């Protein structure tokens, strides 16, 4: 059964936008080349410094292999300084990317906050996506061959 990984990141400052964009590009390129990726979408609202990813994998092991290697693994220590972060995972019968409103609801209801170095007041209070805004302006991750 396909495995969905949904992340939401909110940068602390515009000063991190360019390095974040570079890391995101590298991570997206890695994801497109990773065996087990079925489909994905990245979303960005740069003016609100909020970014989402939705990826659908053949299984949890494929996603874990991606998460623990390459550009993604290298970027993780920086993200803990640059932003607040939350994640939610689930299995679903199909390989479709969840609709933005469903992504928001699942993140708020089932998501977990990741440890960050500079949590916002909402992050400290355990509020996920307190702004109530679903992901917007998405770009599809197109699978490429190695």
Image (cartoon, helix red, strand yellow):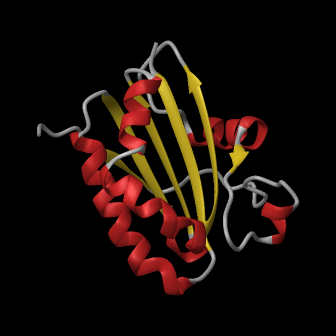
The residue under the point 32% across, 52% down is 28
* Total count of labels: 0
Image coords of residue 51 (percent x, y): 53, 60
The residue under the point 38% across, 70% down is 21
Image side of residue 134 versus residue 59, left or right: right
Image coords of residue 62 (percent x, y): 37, 28
Tell me, yes or no, if residue 45 can be seen here.
Answer: no
Vertical arrangement, residue 10 with respect to residue 139, above or below: below
Image side of residue 98 versus residue 117, left or right: left
Farthest residue toward the left? 146
Image side of residue 10 versus residue 4, left or right: right
Farthest residue toward the right? 125
Image coords of residue 54 (percent x, y): 48, 41
Q: Nearer the viewer, residue 97 or 125?
A: 125
Vertical arrangement, residue 49 with respect to residue 14, above or below: above
The residue under the point 37% across, 21% down is 58
Which quadrant is the C terminus positioned in?
top left
Vertical arrangement, residue 8 with respect to residue 17, above or below: above
The residue under the point 25% across, 52% down is 29
Image coords of residue 56 (percent x, y): 42, 31
Tell me, yes or no, if residue 135 can be seen here.
Answer: yes
């Amino acid at each position: 059964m396909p495995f969905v990984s949904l992340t939401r990141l909110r940068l602390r400052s515009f000063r991190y936008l360019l390095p974040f964009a570079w890391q995101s590009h590298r991570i997206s390129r890695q994801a497109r080349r990773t065996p087990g990726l079925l489909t994905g979408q990245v979303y960005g609202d740069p003016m609100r410094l909020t970014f989402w990813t939705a990826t659908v994998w053949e299984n949890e092991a494929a996603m874990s292999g991606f998460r623990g290697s390459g550009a993604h693994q290298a970027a993780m220590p920086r993200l803990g300084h640059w932003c607040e972060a939350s994640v939610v995972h689930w299995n679903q019968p199909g390989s479709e990317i969840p609709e933005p409103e469903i992504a928001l609801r699942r993140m708020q209801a089932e998501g977990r906050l990741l440890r960050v170095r500079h949590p916002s007041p909402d992050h400290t209070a355990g509020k996920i996506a307190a702004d109530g805004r679903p992901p917007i302006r998405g770009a599809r991750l197109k699978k490429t061959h190695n």
